[in-house]
Image (spheres, helix red, strand yellow):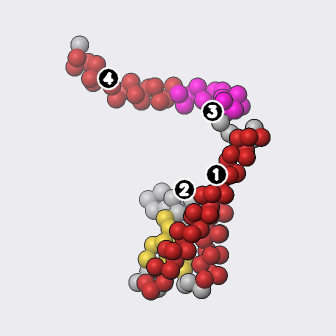
Amino acid sequence: MSKLLLNLRNVADDEIQDVTALLDQAGIAHYWTEPSPWGISFGGIWVSDDGDQPRAKALMAEYQQARSVRVRAERQAALADGSAETFGTLLRRRPLFVVAVLAGMLAAAALVLLPFVLLRG
């Protein structure tokens, strides 16, 4: 029976390619399912054989550790050279978007807190 190795929710395309290549190199039979069009299922990478699951998980742990180190280094380099997106750069580049999102957050918080304010008064 197949076992889910990686849920593809918020997984970058390059990571999907890396993981499938890693499994191919290790000779682990796998397949992946597409996300549903309505967002109910986000898809996944599945290991076909139960016996390969522990080896696949060990490979994934090594890969994720290495990717974590690499991505953090890339982020630090981008922050150092000023090319990383920060709140300040987003505010300068898309001020109306930032103001609209902040207004939406305030409106949502006000709607949530409104019953408490009305019951108190």
* Count of marks, rendered view: 4
Badge 4 vs badge 2, beta-carbon distance below 8 Å: no
Q: Of circles 3 and 1, which is in front?
A: 1
* Vertical relation: 62 (above or below) 52: above
Region of the chain picked out in magenta, as a range: 87-102
What amino acid type should be assigned to the residue bearing mark 1? Arg
Residue 93 in the magenta stretch? The answer is yes
The numbered dot on residue 114 is 4
Residue marked by disc 3: 87
Coordinates of residue 114 in the picture (x, y in percent): 32, 23
Q: Earlier in the sequence, mark 2 or mark 3?
A: 2
Front position in the image: 46 or 96: 46
Residue 99 in the magenta stretch? The answer is yes
Coordinates of residue 54 in the picture (x, y in percent): 46, 79
Q: Of circles 3 and 4, which is in front?
A: 3
Measure the C-alpha gap from mark 3 to mark 1: 18 Å
**Residue for point 50% across, 80% down:** 55
Front position in the image: 12 or 36: 12
What amino acid type should be assigned to the residue bearing mark 2? Asn
Query: Hey, which residue is sitting farthest top in the picture?
Result: 121
Q: Earlier in the sequence, mark 2 or mark 1?
A: 2
What amino acid type should be assigned to the residue bearing mark 3? Phe
- Element at label 4: helix
